[in-house]
Image: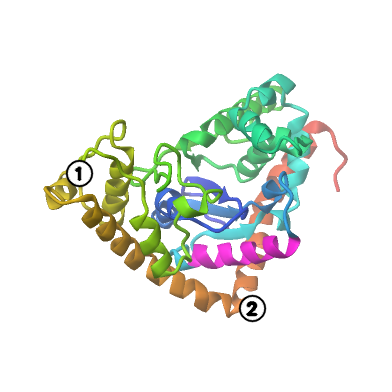
Amino acid sequence: MENTAKKRIFSGIQPSGELTLGSYMGAIRNWTVLQDAYDCVYCIVDLHTITVRQNPADLRRRCMAQLAQYVACGLDPEKSILFIQSHVPEHAELSWILGCYTQFGELSRMTQFKQKSQRHADNINAGLFTYPVLMAADILLYQADLVPVGADQKQHVELCRDIALRFNHIYGDIFTIPEPFIPEIGARVMSLNHPEDKMSKSDPEGCVFLLDKPEDIKRKFKRAVTDSEAHIDYNPEKQPGVSNLLSIYCAATGKAMPDALAQFDGQGYGNLKSAVGEIVIETLRPIREETERLLKDKAYLENIYKTGAERASRIARRTLLKAHKKLGFLPR
């Protein structure tokens, strides 16, 4: 029986590439903390990835690797529901229903649609346009109270709330109205090459991946962009590269920024890069090693995602059938 006493959290990450240091420090590490206080549903959102053409074999591999990394990072399949989005068909079905209660103008104003349309000008498909409706279905299916989000996804959660409120106004209280949730702990990790931008898997040399080898991590930090100021200070506007390195160091060590600044006072950028690289290597080492171990146990991972899909489906089906009844569909 699912635990309904706690508030429920839903979140997911696309398997469109390898998980990054930013994914870990900004999201997954927080998820491991939340699973003790909340009823957590964590998804690998593979349906969202196909707005961009994917190699099928790579997508299957990344889904399995992402699940292994979720567990290696500390997500407990006994405490949290871990599953793959396409294994719960209610996501796609509710998405169609919600699409009929979403206005064209609302979707056309989505910032991410405009950005992705520019990046993928040769493939501006309907899925790219209706992506936020599927995201709303992901959240509303599980009657989520809270949705951990970064600034780039907040607009989508706001649209999700608008859709749910519109549907509820017509048919009664079918959906829980979710709130965006910004955890107290977390870090916004920026690109090592372009520190004014968020760390992204689309920029491999400016991005540290959870499964990177120590020598690759060391090399990437050694090449990290700094500046010509020649002193270490936390000033994201004037010294974005140095500030990013300091933020990563604090997130990895748990140190407060004033303590980190005192530690590196009078030192050069080379020392800072080396120290941050080493602490990141040691932070990610157990995750990489445990992921490698888990990937050798395919049966264990398959059991996690199959059991997770069954648990997720029980919740999702109840929500979908409530919506069906209100819409006037004949019972199945």
Q: Which residue is mark 1?
A: 232
Give the mark nearer the N terminus: 1 vs 2.
1
Q: Which residues are magenta?
A: 56-71
Q: In the image, residue 93 lies at what x, y percent?
A: 78, 44
Q: Quadrant of residue 302?
A: bottom right
| Image side of residue 166 versus residue 153, left or right | right
Q: Amino acid at mark 2?
A: Ala
Instruction: Using a 10 Å C-alpha cutoff, classify the residue at mark 1 as few (fewer than 14 neighbours), some (14 to 19) or many (20 or more).
Output: many
Q: In the image, residue 19 lies at what x, y percent?
A: 52, 57
| Image side of residue 196 versus residue 246, left or right | right
Give above or below for 65 relative to 37.
Answer: below
| Quarter occupied by the N terminus | bottom right
**Label 1 vs label 2, nearer the camera:** 1
Q: In the image, residue 262 lies at what x, y percent?
A: 12, 48
Q: Which residue is mark 2?
A: 299
Q: Quadrant of residue 118?
A: top right
Q: Amino acid at mark 1?
A: Ile
Viewer-proximal residue among 19 and 329: 19
Give above or below for 32 relative to 185.
Answer: below
Asked if the residues shown at circle 1 and circle 2 are in contact, with their CB atoms under 8 angstroms apart, the answer is no
Quote the CA–CA distance across marks 1 and 2: 49 Å
Prevailing secondary structure of the magenta residues: helix
> Which label is found at residue 302?
none
Q: Residue at x 59, y 28 (%)?
A: 111
The colour scheme used to paint the residues is rainbow
